[in-house]
Image: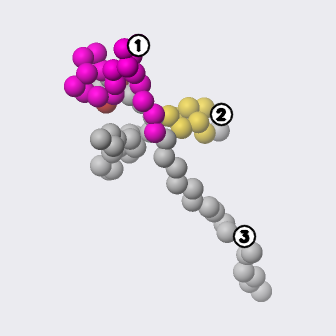
Amino acid sequence: MCQKSEQPESVHISTDVVFAVRDADGNDLLDPDTPGSFDEDDIDVLYFENGEYKPVYESHLDYPRKFYDHK
């Protein structure tokens, strides 16, 4: 006999992380118009899973590194 589970098998949690990187003068180092800024290719997003860091890259997505500029 099959019984309906009272608790879901999985839970989807959506989160956003918003951060800024500025130099000592307050210049936005994530803005490509700022001299000396970081290029998107210089930034990696990593997930910590099962005791190790794994880089995020999914080539089929519009934002394969799962980040983008909200400006």
Which quadrant holds the C terminus?
top left
Whether residue 41 is visible = no
Local packing at callout 2 (Cα closer than 10 Å; few below 14, some 14-19, many 20+) is: few
Residues rendered magenta in the picture: 18-37
Tell me the residue at 67%/69% (across/down).
8
> What residue is pinned by disc 3?
7
- Which residue does the image show at 41% across and 25% down from the upper left? 21
**Residue 32 within the magenta-colored segment of the rendering:** yes
Q: Secondary structure at mark 3?
A: loop
- The mark lying in front, picked from 1 and 3, is 1
Identify residue type, mark 2. Gly
| Mark 2 lies on residue | 51
Q: Nearer the viewer, residue 26 or 63?
A: 26
Where 2 falls versus 71 (above or below)? below
Q: Secondary structure at mark 1?
A: loop
In percent of width and height, residue 55 lies at 47, 34
Q: Which circle's residue, 1 or 3, is located before the other in the chain?
A: 3
25 part of magenta stretch: yes
Q: Which mark is residue 24?
A: 1
Looking at the rendering, which quadrant does residue 22 occupy? top left
Q: Are marks 3 and 2 in contact (CB under 8 Å)?
A: no
Question: Magenta-highlighted stretch: main secondary structure?
Answer: loop
Q: Is residue 70 left or right of residue 32?
A: right
